Amino acid sequence: MSRIRSLWIAAFIAGLVGAFVPKPEFRYGFFMLDTLMHLMIFAILAFMPMILFRNRRTTFLLAISMAPVGYLLENFHMMMTGESFNAINALANNAGVLAGIAAGFFVRLKLHYEREPLTTEADSTPGNTHDNPCRQLKS
């Protein structure tokens, strides 16, 4: 868990540094590398809370809160560097948040079904009352 938290902190710092550092002009020449970096960083920022916390409400609130953070960082970048607002990067931030939430949802779902105990033949015997709560109430 400490590695996951440190990865989340590193991704957040990378987003902050990217917001305050002027970008070179070649950023769109090589497969829109800047936009792909926005997508990956915000996917990590949304994915990590999905797997770190057990409470669903907390995980979704923290993950979805990365979308406004991305918008604010784009505005800070605009104010600090004097460049114009880049809507493509803002959309990449939001797409990354959605991708991170989707990936985190599937990981949570997989972990949920791995924790669920398997039933055995001894559990399904007719005299066994712990598998049927209604049977427990009648006894």
Image: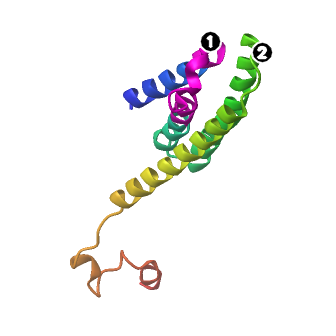
- Label 1 sits on a secondary structure element that is loop
* Above or below, comparing residue 108 to residue 46 in the picture: below
Horizontal side of 93 relative to 81 (left or right) equals left
Q: Nearer the viewer, residue 100 or 81?
A: 81
Could you tell me which quadrant the N terminus lies in?
top left
Magenta stretch contains residue 31: yes
Which numbered disc flags the more N-terminal residue, 2 or 1? 1
Residue lying at 61% horizontally and 43% vertically, measured from the top left:
95
Residue type at the position of mark 2: Met
Horizontal side of 105 relative to 28 (left or right) equals left
Q: Which residue is mark 1?
A: 21
Residue lying at 49% horizontally and 28% vertically, measured from the top left:
8
Q: Specify whether residue 17 is in view.
A: yes
Magenta stretch contains residue 1: no
Residue at the farthest bottom position: 126
Residue lying at 53% horizontally and 43% vertically, measured from the top left:
100
Q: Specify whether residue 65 is in view.
A: no
Q: Which residue is mark 2?
A: 79
Q: Which residues are magenta?
A: 17-42
Measuring from the top left, give residue 110's x and y in whole percent. 39, 56
Measuring from the top left, give residue 103's x and y in whole percent. 48, 49
Label 2, residues with CA under 10 Å away: few <14, some 14-19, many ≥20: some
Residue type at the position of mark 1: Val
Give the Cα distance between marks 2 and 1.
11 Å
* Above or below, comparing residue 57 to residue 83 in the picture: below
Label 1, residues with CA under 10 Å away: few <14, some 14-19, many ≥20: few
Q: Nearer the viewer, residue 137 or 103?
A: 103
